[in-house]
Image (cartoon, rainbow, N blue to C red):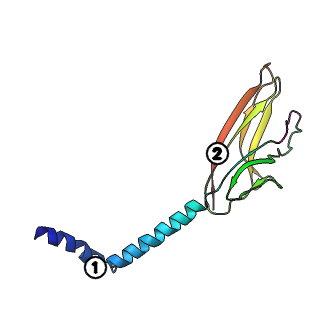
Amino acid sequence: MAERRLRRQPDKQCRSSNFTLGEEISQLKKELLETQRRMKESVHFFASLSADKASVATGTPLVFGTVNLNVGGAYNAANWKFTCKEDGVYFFSWSSLSSPNKDFTSKLVVNGHDIVAVVVDNDLTKDALAGSNSRENRHG
């Protein structure tokens, strides 16, 4: 008999808060479908330089013209821009390599504003040096 009372209790709680169990299930199904839709619409890309950039003038945008992966189509190789199509958190990661005795700085620019930079300070060494950075951005 105690088991029966425990089963009935959630029904009473749902009704007292103006929800039936059926309505709750329906709402959860809607939320699940929306989550599944968003997962199918995931966005990620991988692009690389299409040529060596040994001599790049300061302030020159680097063209990542070789698109290896572009799920969601948010990276445009024609204008070298990634467009956030939805509000959310976006994660960017890149690496830079400098020539011997050369410094190199690369930046993530969002809407014309420098967000973060990778600085490879290599003016005193004979070896190539690498630098990398990761950045999480919120859009919306």
Q: Quadrant of residue 103?
A: top right
List x then y, in percent, for residue 116: 70, 43
Residue 56 is left or right of residue 96, and the answer is right
Residue 7 shown left or right of residue 25 in the figure: left
Which residue is found at the position 83% from the left and 42% from the top?
50
- Direction front: furthest residue: 68
Question: Which residue carries the number 2 mark?
Answer: 135
* Predominant SS of the magenta segment: loop
Q: Is residue 45 magenta?
A: no
How packed mark 1 is, by other alpha carbons closer than 10 Å (few <14, some 14-19, many 20 or more), is few
Residue 109 place in picture, x, y as percent: 75, 49
Residue 90 lies, in percent from the top left, at 63, 53
Magenta residue span: 50-55
Estimate the x, y position of residue 40 in percent, counting from the top left.
58, 61
Could you say whether the residue bearing mark 2 is in a helix, strand or loop? strand
Q: Residue at x 72, y 40 (%)?
A: 117
